[in-house]
Image (cartoon, grey):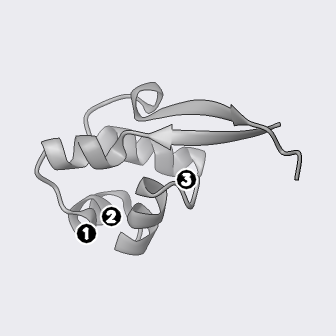
């Protein structure tokens, strides 16, 4: 079983009228990293998850939810 994270980053970022570049600067990463996280192509480190949560005035729990996927490939 593989656990994938779904996230609310794009929704929360847009609700705060922040660009990917702005949130990236607040978190000390590249815009491409934020894009990859928003598109579920990259799972952030724990420290980056906390930085994202702080930047978006929320908690890590509110940013991410997990979904189990079968890895029967």
Is 43 drawn above or below residue 61 in the view shown? below
How far across and down, in percent of the image, does residue 68 sit?
70, 32
Q: Which residue is mark 2?
A: 24
Q: How many marks?
A: 3
Q: Residue at x 49, y 51 (%)?
A: 48
User: Looking at the figure, which quarter contains the N terminus?
Assistant: top right
How far across and down, in percent of the image, does residue 59 sit?
39, 28
Q: Are marks 2 and 1 in contact (CB under 8 Å)?
A: yes
User: Residue extending furthest front?
Assistant: 73
Q: Which residue is mark 1?
A: 21
Q: CA distance from mark 3 to mark 1?
A: 16 Å
Mark carried by residue 47: none
Left or right of 31 on screen, residue 15: left
Q: CA distance from mark 2 to mark 1?
A: 5 Å
How far across and down, in percent of the image, does residue 10 sit?
30, 49
Q: Is disc 2 placed on a helix, strand or loop?
A: helix
Frontmost residue, 14 versus 45? 14
Frontmost residue, 33 versus 25? 33
Mark carried by residue 44: 3
Frontmost residue, 70 versus 60? 70
Q: Are marks 3 and 1 in contact (CB under 8 Å)?
A: no
Q: Is disc 3 placed on a helix, strand or loop?
A: loop
Badge 3 or badge 1: first in the primary sequence: 1
């Amino acid at each position: 079983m593989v656990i994938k994270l779904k996230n609310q980053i794009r929704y929360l970022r847009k609700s705060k009228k922040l660009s990917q570049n702005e949130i990236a600067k607040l978190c000390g990463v590249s815009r491409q990293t934020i894009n990859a996280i928003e598109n579920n192509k990259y799972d952030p480190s724990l420290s980056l998850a906390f930085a994202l949560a702080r930047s978006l005035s929320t908690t890590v729990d509110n940013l991410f939810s997990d979904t189990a996927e079968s890895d029967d490939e």
